Amino acid sequence: MRLEEKNKQVSQECKAITEFFAKGNYESCVLKGQSNIFIYPDRLKGLRTPGDIDLWVWEKGRLSLYDKKKLVNILWRISGKQMEVAIHHAECKMFPETPVEVHFVPSFAINPFTDYKMHRFWAKHSDCILLTNDGFYIPTDGFNLIFQMSHIFRHVLLEGIGFRQLIDYYFVLRSFSDHSSMKSDKKLSNSEEVMKEINNLGMRRITSAVMWIMKEIFAMKDMYLLCDVSEKYGRELLNEVLKGGNFGHSSDEHAKLKVDDEGKETLASKVEGNFATIKRGMKLFWSYPSECLWVPYLCFRASWVRNYWRKVKFER
């Protein structure tokens, strides 16, 4: 079957890129995407549609979350500078068909104060990874519950999410409860410890919304839920999923990319994109004020980071 063959190909590429960075004294972990096939039931593993490769990379024995120059230089060399550097990852061309995002940190928060806490969490739990039989590392379930919730939260506020991310989370919850072998980290071995970190990272409300969808839409039993459900925020989240879909591509508010004759994004497109992001964030302000308030700041920060690395790239 075509999907099964594609999954095998992407898994082989995950192994290859893991071995590549290991030779350079780097540790790595495949996030979401291809790592999620290990939490799906056996009959469904090969049927999940594969996407790009998200690889969290850090230097062995030294997880410096703010110093990424050395890693960026390595990525420039192997990709021929065919890449873009964003706040938390670099988009690289390393394989003919599969896009690669090398992450400096797994995810980030919009609120800079929460983002600082999140950076500390990643550093503290960088050992919460498991080596698969396919030759690459994936997160433990406890880590995954927090990471993928942060990923869902950020996309809800900035771009939109689809049912695939929620289905992935459904199977993370099931795996966390059913498969003790996936919970080798003692730091995040039960739902109370996971919820403690989720609360600390300001994600309690979005978690209660996701739990409502798990229960009401996916018919998940209460024993698998992390916390009490919220119908109010759950219905709001469901409406956003149905209206916008993954990255908001189905939404009327989704800004279309405008490019010049050379195929580069125009200033008008950048302005429209930032305006659409801010507009979306403000729409959800009353539900998630501590994050939405900082959306304009994030747009400025993201633009500054991209332009800075583009300038450095062309100077070298």
Image (cartoon, helix red, strand yellow):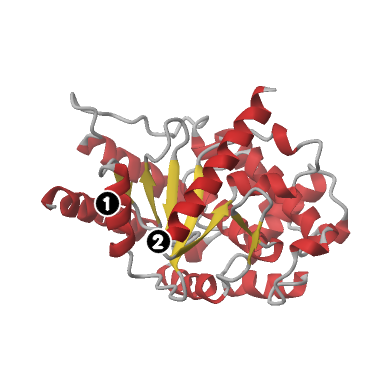
**Quarter of the image where the N terminus is located:** top right
Q: Is residue 265 above or below residue 307?
A: above
Residue at image position (28%, 29%) is 258
Q: Which amino acid type corresponds to the residue marked 2 in the rendered image?
A: Gly
Q: Is residue 114 above or below residue 152?
A: below
> Real-space Cα distance between discs 2 and 1?
26 Å
Q: Is residue 282 visible?
A: no
Residue at image position (31%, 55%) is 74
User: For residue 102, which numbered disc appears in the image?
Assistant: none
Q: Is residue 24 left or right of residue 285?
A: left
Q: Is residue 176 visible?
A: yes
Where is residue 40 shown, x and y percent of the image? 75, 44
- Occupied quadrant, residue 7: top right
Q: Which residue is mark 2?
A: 24
Q: Residues within 10 Å of mark 1 (few under 14, many from 20)?
A: some
- Asked if disc 2 and disc 1 are in contact, CB closer than 8 Å, the reply is no
Q: Which amino acid type corresponds to the residue marked 1 in the rendered image?
A: Arg
Where is residue 191 shown, x and y percent of the image? 76, 69
Q: Between label 2 and label 1, give the one nearer the viewer.
A: 2
Q: Residue 17 or 279: which is nearer the viewer?
A: 17
Q: Residue 56 or 21: which is nearer the viewer?
A: 21
Residue at image position (44%, 38%) is 99
Q: Residue 62 or 268: which is nearer the viewer?
A: 62
**Earlier sequence position, callout 2 versus callout 1:** 2
Q: Residue 18 or 23: which is nearer the viewer?
A: 23
Residue at the farthest front position: 23
Where is residue 276 shown, x and y percent of the image? 38, 42
User: For residue 306, which numbered disc appears in the image?
Assistant: 1
Q: Determine whether the residue tagged by mark 2 lies in a helix, strand or loop.
A: loop
